[in-house]
Image (spheres, helix red, strand yellow):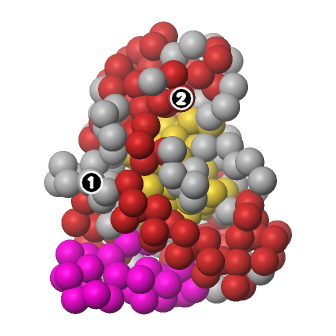
Amino acid sequence: MSRIPLISGNWKMNLNHFEAIQMVQKLSYELRNHDYDAVEVSVHPPYTDLRSIQTLIDADRMHFHLGAQNCHAESSGAFTGEVSPAMLQKLEVGFVIVGHSERRSLSGETNEIVAAKAKSVFAHGMVPIVCVGETLEERESGGAESVVETQVTGSLADLSKDQLSELVIAYEPVWAIGTGKTASAEDAQLMCAHIRSVVTAIHKPAGTKVRIQYGGSVNASNAVELMSMEDIDGALVGGASLEAASFARIVSFQDA
Ligand code: PEP
């Protein structure tokens, strides 16, 4: 079963809409058509940039998917400051990151909240990228696998069998995010294989289809080895996605 790798750039709270336009134009210039033959690419700018980037992708027929970094689970309502999946759908967003560790730790997102968001993203015709990953203490105490397993089962609890196959899961060890410390390719592979076995146990066919990204200080130098691993189907990239040339080198990892 061949799964098309998905390389996603999570810009977090960086780049205003003018800077975002420049960034996407540069990225498009850096990439060649054949780069998209075997890889899908999504960019996840802040909400305020989405309309500008959507217009640019449309007008220049760029091959990127537009992504968002979060959304509310409800379609509309009295939720001051929130953005609904219905609004993202109107902007032709394809992928929505849910349950990023920064949202789990800074905004108190539980597995139940992440599950409701993932369900709602699918209900609005988009695909969630569900993030899971252990902290350093959890890894050092030997509990990484069970923590990640609980996150996976809890965060996917509301999805149908078909949705499980379409889903993207990002394994992002918290200690590797923005720290410059990457999990070894072998450790990342072991955890991604474990995640796949957890999905397989829920619905066997979904186990071979679900795409599992690795995230955590991915850069042009380590991407090739990480992506060569059997159960790693792409990357969720933070810092290195803010610079067009470095993100382009990750996207074209197969040329290395
Ligand atoms: C992320 O934000 O999901 C991430 C993995 O960040 P970084 O690549 O900077 O570690």
Residue 151, given in percent of the width and then of the height, sits at 47, 82
Q: Is mark 2 within 8 Å of ligand 1?
A: no
Residue 143 visible to an observer of this rendering:
yes
Whole-number angstrom distance, CA of label 1 to CA of label 2: 20 Å
Question: Residue at the location (28% across, 48% down)?
Answer: 217
Main SS of the magenta part reads helix
> Is there a contact, CB below 8 Å, between mark 1 and mark 2?
no
Q: Residue at x 68, y 62 (%)?
A: 210
Which residue is more in the foreground, 98 or 193? 193
Amino acid carrying label 1: it is Thr
Q: Quadrant of residue 133?
A: bottom left
From the viewer's perspective, tell me whether residue 126 is left or right of residue 162.
Answer: left
Left or right: residue 4 versus residue 136 is: right
User: Which residue range is magenta in the image?
Assistant: 132-155
Residue toward you, 69 or 33: 33
Where is residue 115 shown, x and y percent of the image?
58, 79
Residue lying at the far front in this picture: please name it: 186
Name which residue lies at 37% across and 65% down.
187
Instruction: Return the mark for residue 182.
Output: 1
- Any magenta on residue 244? no
Image vertical order of residue 242 relative to residue 34, above or below:
below
SS state under label 1: loop
Q: Quadrant of the C terminus?
A: top left
Label 1 packing within 10 angstroms: few (<14), some (14-19), many (20+): many
Q: Position of residue 164 (x, y in %)?
A: 72, 71
User: Looking at the picture, how far across and down is residue 78, in whole percent?
Assistant: 51, 74
- Name which residue type carries label 2: Gln
Residues packed near mark 2 inside 10 Å, few (<14), some (14 to 19) or many (20 plus):
some
Residue with the mark numbered 2:
254
Lower sequence index among marks 1 and 2:
1
